[in-house]
Amino acid sequence: VGITLDSPSGQNAVEGNVQFEGEYETVNGGTLQWRIGKEDWVDERTYAGSGGTKDMFNFIWDSTQYPDGEYRISLRFVSSTGIRSEEVRLTMEIDNQPPAPDLMFRSGITVSEWGIPLSETYVNSFVDVSAEIRNDGDQSATNVVVYLLEEGTRKYELNIPTIDSGDIVDVTLYWNPLTVGKREISIALDPGDAILEIDETNNDQSIEFDVIQRPEGVDLAFSNGAFTTTPTIPRPGEQFQINARVDNLGSSAAEGIEAQLHLFTERGWELTSSTTIPRIEGGSDSTVSFAQTKEESGALKFRISLSGPVLSDIDWSNNQAEWSILIEKSTVSGGRALNFQTGETPVDVIDLDAEGIVVTSKDGGLALYRLNSNKGMTACSNMLEEKWSGDFVSASTSDGIAHIVWTRRFLDTSGYLKQTVSYSTIDSSCEMRPIQDLMDPILLSDGKYWGIDIDVDDTKLLVAGYHRDFLTGGTYQDLTSIFILEADAPTSSNDWRLTPNAISDIDVVAGYTDPIQIEYGEEYGHILYQSMRNDTTGLNRLGLWYAHGDIKQSSWTYKKAVGDHASLPQMKVNTVDDEDRLVVAWKEGSGSNSELITRIVDDTFSTISNSSMQISARGLSQIVFSETSRGVQIMHDMVGSGGPQVHYGMINSENPWMAISNRISDGWLHSVSRSPDSGEAVIIHTSTQGWVIRAVIDDSKPNTGAIDILEELRFQLGLDEGSFNILVGGIAIAVLLLCTIVLGVMSTRAVRWMGGRRRKTAQGVVMLEDDVVDVIDDDDIPVETIDTSSIVEVVGADLETTSQRQDRRQRRANQQEVAQMSPDAPNLTPPPVNQGMIAEPIPPMGDRPPLPGLPPMNKPVVCPECGSRFDVAFELKMTRCPICALRIDL
């Protein structure tokens, strides 16, 4: 007995009457049956006969009796003796109605406060009411009106411009309950029936929710995230403000509230300042501020307490709160919006110094975007991965590349879908090296790889992850273990060394665990991982475990449970005095009971110098570590009084201290990246307008040793590495061609010069005469009298500045020459001295002519070079020798 179906094929939608055709084979006749899904079988037609029969069948099936949609129809043939054939199943789509939208709820209604579900709320509070809506029709729905109703009365209205066919939309409406008691709240889609839908009966959903009365009296409290600073990161030596929000949870007003600020010092808690809050109404809040200054960078721990002479508080335990903030020379940049395509979400951000990469999930693969120095985003032409399977991790290095590891699926040569772990590197221009597959590909039915992490130590790489194996060497035992991969500057898959089962028999489920944390140590490798535990309490819960061991060996023996209901582990290892110090953080609890745990421990996971903090972090969803020269930066989020917040802090393991934390932005934290050579940590987080990217920028860039001039030039030009290499190559080729031309021209000239020199060589004979003596007689050199006035150079007034010392020397020389030239004068009797006689005037000349003037005065000059003597006019300052033409200063 058998049956085959020829039509319909199921590839196209059907409508109206559908004709089924095929062939049956039976013995002694039988009945043809069909059914939809798992409904009861329906007898379609009975065939008579005797003996073996093989014939064709056909019948008409009315599809209008079912709403539009996909259905599975099954056919079988039952012989007259009760023998049933194998079922023939066919999936087909019924499309009888014209194209129309069909709005429906994909999830139930949730009442929450900033994303944290609530079971009750105070009267006169503000909460969110959310749900998921899907358009299950075959046409887009436009201008979709959504109502929030309380006891049938509209409280909030939302308009959605468009919901495309098949799209799922999250809607959030806001509710301010003003009545105490159990209240019915409803969400209505298209309440006015303005949209013609396929099904109008699935557009409403309701729940009941408790609204409780606020306590009578005054109840002052500090909520989560109540502390902020102005600026967000205070700087050493500059004044800043500590701000604290005070909530009155009670129904009565509080008056005359004194707020005191205490700082933690070496002497303990010291009162620093205080202020007074005049009044806080019931159900409202107020903000108090304190001005402070701290000279050194580091942690500032403070406490704020509330009191008052007439204050009567219902609960005094929440009137005091402690917090710590970070003081350092850093600045938070402004946010820049990231625009992705519909259905595209970021996976990770990779900082590559002044540039970077954003990796996104798109159409089941991994897409790439380039980041410039201004955090502007440009789509890359290549995809990182076409069939991504959910895990991705990266590690930036100082050479301008990032090591990336991810899980992926692929079809092998036999057409089977398999999964593996892959590795490559990527630079700021989205260029990747050939992909290396690190693990043996496995069928999806045989196991899974997930939860991977990577650590980089110079050129050495360390990768770890979970491996679930359904076969376990043919024993068909479902076991989960941790594998380790290590390589040193790998160029192919064969360069990696695998250490399987480093930690085995782990009780976790894929999709409910966070990535492993693995780090190089001085002697051992260190791992933080998750696994179920039931010790101490006997209750099964997801715990956090620590292990260390030899990276090259399987089955590590040192394991220690360190956390309860733990998730989001983070770890960095620093070596101080040849000992490993671990900076660790994780989340404990969930929802409104979430706590952030941070510690500095040794390789036995014992706390060092009481360096441990445990703070309430309501709604904590992400923790990220980044290493710097100053310590480990910690980024996390939490829900504060005004919504989700992104916080920033620092942990220093060398001189153990913690500063956790400063609120730097609003929104949910997604990813953080920092390059070793970078002076900033790049952050992607959400906001009310969508995805935002910003950075925490250090005042100065870290000292990375020698400066690469080419890299600095590339950053100044704003070029990526590929474009800059093309530019440098072009310049190098141009310079090489120019040098070649110059060398060719100079070589040609040199050849010509050498050839000409060889052609013009002169030959001759030098005759030498022996004992040649020239005799010069006195009359060979005629001496003539020369008028010195014709060869004397007159010097103008500009020579009057001649040195007085030279003048004195010249006068002494002249006096000596005059003394040598004058004969010895005889001893003369001195003239008689006038004894009082009065000189008589000269008699008049009469008509006689006047007497002639005195002859001009000359002065003798001796040439220091040739020894010649001559006279020159007395008023000259300089002259030249008439024999040797030497310049002589007079």
Image (spheres, rainbow, N blue to C red):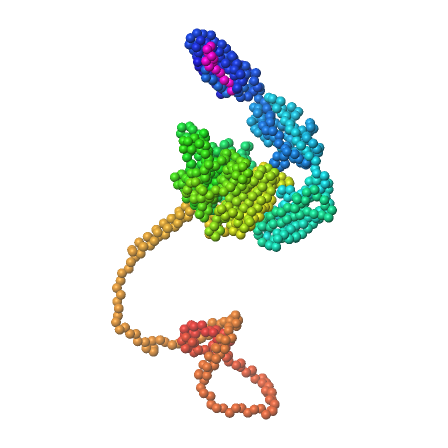
Give how far across and how far down residue 413 sits, in percent.
40, 29
Residue 455 in view (yes/no)? no
Segment colored magenta: 72-84
Pick the residue in front: 703 or 514.
Answer: 514
Viewed as shown, does residue 117 lie left or right of 474? right
> Is 24 located above or below residue 681 in the figure?
above
- The residue lying at 35 percent from left, 51 percent from top is 747
762 in magenta: no
Residue 20 in view (yes/no)? yes
Pick the residue in front: 444 or 809.
Answer: 444
Pick the residue in front: 456 or 596.
Answer: 596
Give how far across and how far down residue 796 sits, in percent.
51, 71
Pick the residue in front: 551 or 643.
Answer: 551
Viewed as shown, does residue 285 lie left or right of 29? right
- The residue lying at 71 percent from left, 32 percent from top is 179
Q: How many numbered dots are placed on residues in this image?
A: 0
Classified by dominant secondary structure, the portion drawn in magenta counts as strand
> Is 39 located above or below residue 155 in the figure?
above
Give how far across and how far down residue 366 sits, in percent.
49, 35
- The residue lying at 40 percent from left, 76 percent from top is 866
Give how far across and how far down residue 381 sits, in percent.
48, 36
Is the N terminus in the top left, top right, bottom left or bottom right quadrant?
top left
